[in-house]
Amino acid sequence: MNTLLGLLIIAVGSFCQSSSYVPIKKVKEWSWESFWLVQGLFAWLVFPLLGALLAVPAGGSLGEILAADPAAAF
């Protein structure tokens, strides 16, 4: 079971990593710095926050969890 879970996590990570190249045709005129800045903004700020908000159990809030035990966030 652990092997299947590991393979599933790898598959999801691979899909997420490869999907970062989807908009490459739309941004060919951009400088590479601009592309990486936008990609970094979404990869390091937007999607992790969205994932954290989706992972919080129903009836709770991310603020309550962080206020109760900041170490629980990690």
Image (cartoon, rainbow, N blue to C red):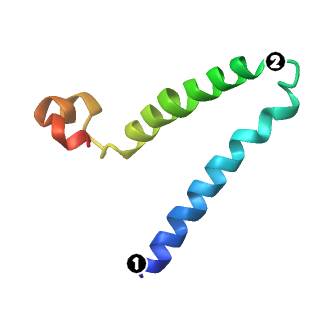
Q: Helix or strand or loop: what does disc 2 sit on?
A: loop
The percent position of residue 48, horizontal first and vertical second, equals 45, 36
* Residue, far bottom: 1
The percent position of residue 8, horizontal first and vertical second, equals 53, 68
The percent position of residue 4, horizontal first and vertical second, equals 49, 77
Residue at 20% from the left image edge and 36% from the top image edge: 65
Discs 1, 2 touching: Cβ within 8 Å: no
Residue 56 is marked as: none
Q: Amino acid at mark 2?
A: Trp
Left or right of 65, for residue 44: right
Q: Helix or strand or loop: what does disc 1 sit on?
A: helix
Residue at 66% from the left image edge and 26% from the top image edge: 36
Marks 1 and 2 sit apart, C-alpha to C-alpha, by: 43 Å
Q: Which quarter of the picture shows residue 62? A: top left
The percent position of residue 50, horizontal first and vertical second, equals 46, 35
- Mark 1 lies on residue: 2
Q: Amino acid at mark 1?
A: Asn
The numbered mark, 1 or 2, whose residue comes first in the sequence reads: 1
Q: Which quarter of the picture shows residue 27? A: top right
- Mark 2 lies on residue: 30
